[in-house]
Image (tube, grey):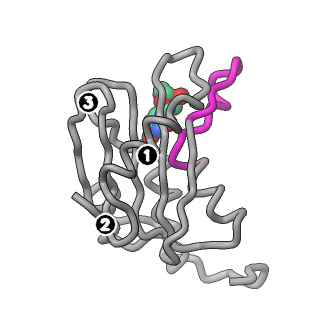
Amino acid sequence: MSNKHLKWEEIITMLEKLIKNSYSPYSGIKVAAILVSCKGSRYIGVNVENASYGLTECAERVAVFNMVANGEKCIESIFIASNTTKPLPPCGACRQVIREFAKLDTIVTSISLTTKEVAQWKLEDLLPYSFTKQYITRREHSSE
Ligand code: THU
C-alpha cells in the first residue's frame, strides 16, 4: 500500500515514533496522525488530554491545525494510528474539521499498531451530507 507521497512502511515507522508523544494519561488511548497536504508536505498530530477532560484534543485535529498554521489549506490524505486493538475511526468533530480542507473522495486510513489491522474510508462515507462553507452566504468577514 502506498500513496502519492509516502511509502506505507515509511508511514508506519513515522506513526510508531510519533505515537510515543501522545499525552493520554486519563484514557490510556494513544493516537497519532500524519496528514499529507496537497503540496506533499506532512503534518503531525497526537492526542493531548487534559485534567479537565472535555478540553482533550484529538490527534487528527492537531494535525489539521498544524497544517493551517503552516500556511496550507488542502488535505491530500490522512493516516491515523492508535494503540487500540481495532483501527480507530475519527470522531465526529475530527470528521467535520477534516472535511473543511478535504474533498469527499479523500481517503482516511487508520491502523491499529497493536494488531496491524488497517481500515480505510472515503471521507464521504464517514461524513455524508456534510456541512461546508458552500452553505454559508454571509462571508463579508472572510478573507477566503
Ligand atoms: N481520540 C483521538 O485522538 N482521535 C479520535 O478521532 C478519537 C479519539 C483520542 C481522544 C482521547 O484522548 C482518546 O482518544 C480517547 O477518546
> Dot 1 corresponds to which residue?
92
- The image shows residue 46, relative to residue 131, as above or below, that is above
Q: Nearer the viewer, residue 123 or 29?
A: 29
Q: Position of residue 130 (x, y in %)?
A: 40, 65
Residue at 69% x, 82% y: name it: 139
Q: Position of residue 142 (x, y in %)?
A: 73, 80
User: Mark 2 is on which residue type?
Assistant: Asn
> Which numbered disc flags the more N-terminal residue, 2 or 3?
2
Report, in whole angstroms, how far the alpha carbon at label 3 lies from the one at label 1.
17 Å
Which of labels 1 and 2 is toward the front? 2
Let me know if residue 59 is in the magenta part: yes
Q: Secondary structure at mark 1?
A: helix
Report, in whole angstroms, how far the alpha carbon at label 2 lies from the one at label 3.
22 Å
Q: Is residue 24 left or right of residue 109?
A: right
Label disc, if present, on residue 3 of the rendered structure: 2
Q: Which corner quadrant of the image does residue 43 belong to? A: bottom right
Q: Which residues are magenta?
A: 47-61
Report, in whole angstroms, how far the alpha carbon at label 1 lies from the one at label 2.
25 Å
Q: Position of residue 41 (x, y in %)?
A: 54, 68
